[in-house]
Image (spheres, rainbow, N blue to C red):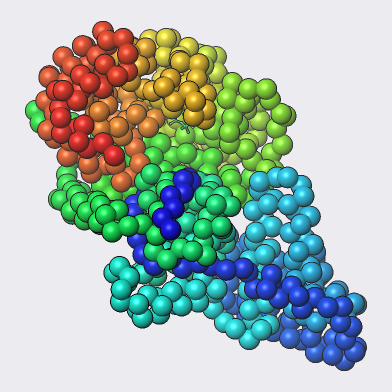
Amino acid sequence: MYTLLKGIAAAPGIGMGKAAAKGQRPEQRQADAAASVSLTPQAAEEELLRYGLAAEVAARELEELAERTRERMGAEEAEIFETHLLLFGDEEFDGGIRRRIRGERKPAALAVEETASEVAALLESLDDEYLSGRAADIRDVAARLLRHLAGEGGSESAAVLRGAEEQAAGKESEPAAGPPVLLAADLSPSDTAQLDKSAAAGFATAAGGRTSHSAIMARSLGIPAVVGLGPALLAAMADARYVIVDGDAGVLHINPGDALIGEYERRQREAEERARSYGRLLAEETRSQDGRRVELAANIGSARDARAAAAAGAEGVGLFRTEFLYMDREALPSEDEQFAAYREAVEAFNAKRQPVVIRTLDIGGDKKLPYLPLPQEENPFLGHRAIRLCLDQTDLFRTQLRAILRASAYGNVKILFPMIAALSEWRRAKALLDATKEELAREGLPFNAETETGIMIEIPAAALMADRFAKEVDFFSIGTNDLVQYTLAADRMNERLAYLTDPFYPAVLRLIDRVIRAARAEGKWTGMCGEMAGHPLALPILLGLGLQEFSMSAPSILPARSWLARLDSRECEALAAEALELEEPDEVRALVEARFPFLAAGQA
Ligand code: PEP
Ligand code: MG
């Protein structure tokens, strides 16, 4: 039976193939072994020895996995396995297992299951997203230990994939037998890290969000993924034979008909052809048809993203969302850890001294840090967040400023302050930066004293006062994601307000126009790092308004470069002037579509 499920688009692209359902975890399958066996003291000692050996093998395996992940994906992803390794010295986990074996004389497997369930349940009961994630880590390590205690090596997902491949090879009547698509209740980080494009055409899970570990890894690995499909996936899994994961639309087609398969095969071929044709633009500068130079930069969240962006043709980084370095961990990252990440990102672009704009911590609103308890707020998006928080927690802020400044000795760093509403905030932040520079100079640590410093324009008050800010800052970066929500007073997370969270409202265009003019009057430059910068229909308007830097997700860069090369900047200036006089976003889009039909066709 054909079923369509809607979930969260976690990693882009189309993945089609035989369904490979990942079953229950081994520790659940072995749960019925939980008879209350009491071993003799000697047998308990033997079990302790067996546990010690299994733990040793599992630890070695994790070390290798961490090493491989570090090479393939980067230090940040490898950290997950380093965290797993720590469990072997953990008093509650490792100590708990040993106590159960020796003190309660339980078999090793039972001791692992009971301890893991107890510790994981405790963490989950705390109703904290981060700690629930740690519960998943505990289950992951327990499953690994149980596999070794049972004398099985390797990972479960690898076994499932092997099984599905064998099955697919044996059934010629089914559509083409490439790698299968993995369906699972959830995927642990170690499961995901073992996948690659040749082993899995895609995956879909019932649990998870866009920022879950497996989603982050899928994006790094280029495996299309949809997560958060809910219990409906679990119900449909048994009946799933062939599936299509649409990682762009966030949907899963189960048992599609020939027509739908044909349609997706066509889309896949088109995407491959497009990607090939863009390759020639990789090393080119971005210019409009009449030769106006603009910069196409990438939005990144890690040093690894920086390397990928450089390989995808980015001419720099327009936004390094540093808050991702602070998430998924148990304590604030140290100055040295941050320095290493910033330096790595900067060095990825230093061959041509291309700029890397590092934004200081933008936490609060929907982004929380488990180890930094913040009071509950009625309106978190209007709350004590980003620069407001950093100006109150100056130790945290100065640690980050030191790390960014130290990285400035290794390339073209620019510093960006988020959520600036008032001139006083900018001045306080700048004063703290200057004091930090003096501190580093006293300590004899190298940094670039001339590091350009700018602000995000994402609050209407800042856009309206841009002429004053422009006298003091080096650049502006327009954050349309927030600028739109604050201008239209429409929460960007509320799907019922989608008609208002639209950057094509002339009210928003007028603010953008004002900001670019104010900067230009003072000889400063303006970039944009909100999602609007990567929207095909926005390109001619932004070019016409005089935007100099467009920062977007790395895969959008080459298409944008090819479209900009077909636009005449004078014609775009006239178009932008017309757009500013319209009333509704639909009118603005229709204007652009009528003038540049190839951009309308370029929309997803
Ligand atoms: C924005 O608000 O446009 C922006 C780029 O920042 P974020 O999406 O991280 O809030
Ligand atoms: Mg923002």
Picture quadrant where residue 391 is located: top right
- As drawn, 157 above or below 231: below
Q: Nearer the viewer, residue 363 or 128?
A: 128
Q: Which image quarter is the N terminus in?
A: bottom left
How many discs appear? Answer: 0
Q: Is residue 35 left or right of residue 412?
A: right
Picture quadrant where residue 42 is located: bottom right
Q: Is residue 308 left or right of residue 400?
A: left
Q: Residue at horizontal 89%, vertical 83%?
A: 38
Q: Residue at horizontal 80%, vertical 89%?
A: 46
Q: Nearer the viewer, residue 460 or 163?
A: 163
Residue found farthest to the front: 1
**Residue 237 coordinates in the image, percent (x, y):** 51, 61
Q: Nearer the viewer, residue 591 or 305?
A: 591
For residue 583, say whether it is visible.
Answer: yes
- As drawn, 184 above or below 600: below
Q: Nearer the viewer, residue 131 or 418?
A: 131
Q: Residue at horizontal 66%, vertical 30%?
A: 393
**Residue 451 coordinates in the image, percent (x, y):** 40, 32
